[in-house]
Image (tube, rainbow, N blue to C red):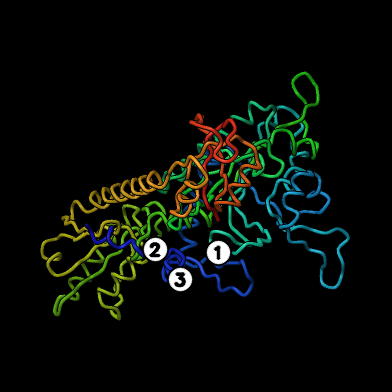
Amino acid sequence: MTKNTSKVEEKFGNFSEWFDKVLLEAQIADDRYPVKGFTVYTGWGFSIAKRIVQMLEEELEEEDHQPMQFPVVIPEDAFEKEAEHIAGFSGEVFWITHAGENKLERRLVLRPTSETAIYPLFKIWIRSHADLPLRMHQTCNVYRYETRATRPLYRGREFLWNEAHTAHADYEDSENQVRNAVEIYSSVYDRLGLSYILLKRPDFDKFAGAVYSLAFDTWNPDGKVNQIGTVHELGDNFAKAFEVTYEDEAGEQRIAYTTCYGMGMGRTLAATISHHGDDHGLVLPPVVAPKQVVIIPIPYRGSVEAVGEYAREIRGRLREEGIRVVLDDDDRLRPGEKFYRWEMFGVPVRIEVGPKEVEERSVTLFRRDTFERVKADYESLVDVVRSLFDEIFQNLKDRSRKYLESEIAEAENLEQLKACMDERKIVKVNWCGDPDCAFRMKDEVVGEVRGTLWERHEGPTGPCIVCGGAAKEVAYVSRTY
């Protein structure tokens, strides 16, 4: 057994303690801000989050989504236009009622999501069929008064996300957009090496005002699932409420169809940390690592200058090739202390340089994911580093997928389902589709019906696990944040 695989006990045995330690020691985030539910992204964590944002924004803009930035406030009259939507969010909104001592003429909402902020502008921008489809996105903070226990990155009252909103001439085109959104999100999650299940949410758990909702659920070491992204088909519900119409080719006025989708950066960052990390700290996919390589000189007496010069030469070579590299030549720390620090930060590759490497014009490379060392000569350095990046990413991706597969179980009755919940599994059950049966599962086994597979239909193999009636589908049940 390698050193790496033997050092994951803490992550799975006491996830909460492990996660809090990593957040602080790896400078990811700090939740000691003096307002509950509001978290500070610190240097290393925000650098990773920005790279995830960039990956997503590039994919969206490649698919003709225009970047925009809407105000953070929504007037009350606009927020209340879609009745189902306001009912779904009424208990979570922050209201702005005063400016100084002056009471506002109309209350403002801090956006919990932006449909009701954006569609009044869609009504202005969309006049004819030539204006469609319209696609936009923004990366911003949203605000929801979360009443359940808050947790940094997973559940807060302010969180960073990217939301996209689109308008279309007909339902068929909006359905195509839903599929396009799924492809975009899947691409980002795949590039992060994350494994997930794409589920269609049951109607009682869909986005308020949507025709249907899709969600990317991913595993977490504590047995709860982490929802990292959602895609919503809105049909013409919001367009009707906000009178978003267009003139078709025949000169007739028609209602537009809309979609929206959001990716939580905190939850995506949390998944990246929890899937790949170990008891030494972060293990980062090279694509989002703020520094992909760290060089650590290990000089002996009489070799300090030569080792330092060679280390700087290596740094220059890697920088020229576009590799994000840092040289840790802080002489206040011993090499072992530097090893600990950069392992906690999850830098994918460490280069160790001592007198022997100087003499041989070679380097010793250390893989963060497996703790293995390999040697390379200076001339082949760049190729070897890039090859290691590919191998590390594939290893992380494969490990995440294998773990997800190992966590999926099946249950034929409530007793089996409860046992699986206690074992922290994601469980497939036969379900009749009745919300009452779903609510009973939640009450009796403390597990939620998350939905059914969207990509393909899974036929039930027996009666409903709760009522014993005819099952219509296979549902996935799990505990969740």
Residue 231 in view (yes/no) = yes
Distance, label 3 to label 2, CA atoms, is 19 Å
Write the residue at 48% across / 31% down: 461
Foreground pick, 41 / 422: 422
Query: Is 481 rendered above or below residue 163?
Result: below
Distance, label 2 to label 1, CA atoms, is 18 Å
Foreground pick, 301 / 244: 244
Q: Residues within 10 Å of mark 1 (few under 14, many from 20)?
A: some
- The total of numbered circles placed on residues is 3
Q: How crowded is mark 2: few (under 14 residues within 10 Å), some or many (20 or more)?
A: few
Which secondary structure lies at badge 3?
helix
Type of amino acid at the residue the image marks with label 3: Leu
Write the residue at 31% across / 60% down: 293
Distance, label 3 to label 1, CA atoms, is 14 Å
Give the labeled residue for mark 1: 151
Give the labeled residue for mark 3: 24
Q: Earlier in the sequence, mark 2 or mark 1?
A: 2
Tell me the mark number nearer the camera, choosing from 2 and 1. Answer: 2
Quarter location, residue 7: bottom left
Image quadrant containing the N terminus: bottom left
Q: Where residue 177 sits in the image (x, y, percent)? A: 59, 33
Q: Where residue 283 sits in the image (x, y, percent)? A: 36, 58
The tag on residue 257 is none
Quarter location, residue 203: top right
Give the labeled residue for mark 2: 13
Residue 456 in view (yes/no) = no
Give the side of residue 50 with respect to residue 95, left or right.
Answer: left
